[in-house]
Amino acid sequence: MPTQDALAKYDQLIARHRGLIVKVCQIYCHRDMELARDLYQDIALKLWTEMDHFRGESSEATWLWHIAVNTAIDKLRHEEAGPGIELTSNPPEPTTYDHPQQIDDLYEAIAHLPADDQLLVSYRLDGYSYCDIACFTNQSEGSLRVRYSRIIKQLKTMLNHK
């Protein structure tokens, strides 16, 4: 049986990085909310089992990002394996926006990007700095800035032709 300290540590980990987990779920599951909720639970389970293995060689967010992305990739490869174990009963609900059609168009365009580009856009939309993203992805800030600029041009072109 887990200790109160372990449960508190886990709850704090999830609370600190809920946005990152949700973004990975949104990117890899596109608009399939049921699959995204299942993936959220799978990531939460994986974090519970791996929590004690964090060695501090990278930032906690970088470590968590790798676990979340790898869990997403594994789930999508083995989707028929069955439902995950529910560790938390409160995955976040989707946000509502003032201009839903524009947001839908943007997310539809983003969904046509490669997964790595989707994650980069998602991190920037969430306000992560290039420095933070460089830590998550083990890429240089300069290459991320150039890549992001190219992605934005590509998205503008996609949205202008809609």
Image (tube, rainbow, N blue to C red):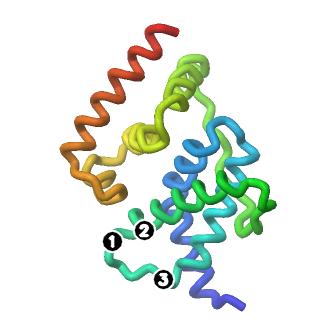
Q: Position of residue 41 (x, y in %)?
A: 69, 61
Q: Residues within 10 Å of mark 1 (few under 14, many from 20)?
A: few
For the residue marked with disc 2, what is the amino acid?
Trp
Q: Which residue is mark 1?
A: 58
For the residue marked with disc 3, what is the amino acid?
His
Q: Are marks 2 and 1 in contact (CB under 8 Å)?
A: yes
Query: Is 77 on the left-hand or right-hand side of 57?
Result: right
Residue 61, picture quadrant: bottom left
Q: Position of residue 6 (x, y in %)?
A: 58, 85
Question: Tag on residue 53?
Answer: 3
Residue in the picture at 51% in, 24% down: 109
Q: Position of residue 15 (x, y in %)?
A: 54, 63
Q: Position of residue 149 (x, y in %)?
A: 28, 30
Q: Are marks 1 and 3 in contact (CB under 8 Å)?
A: no
Residue 62, picture quadrant: bottom left
Q: Which one is in front, 126 or 107?
A: 107
Quick check: can you spot residue 126? no
Q: Which one is earlier in the sequence, the residue at label 2 or at label 1?
A: 1
Q: CA distance from mark 2 to mark 1?
A: 6 Å
Q: Which residue is mark 2?
A: 63
Above or below 25: residue 135: below
Q: CA distance from mark 3 to mark 2?
A: 10 Å
Residue in the picture at 67% in, 48% down: 36
Q: CA distance from mark 1 to mark 3?
A: 12 Å
Q: Residues within 10 Å of mark 2 (few under 14, many from 20)?
A: some
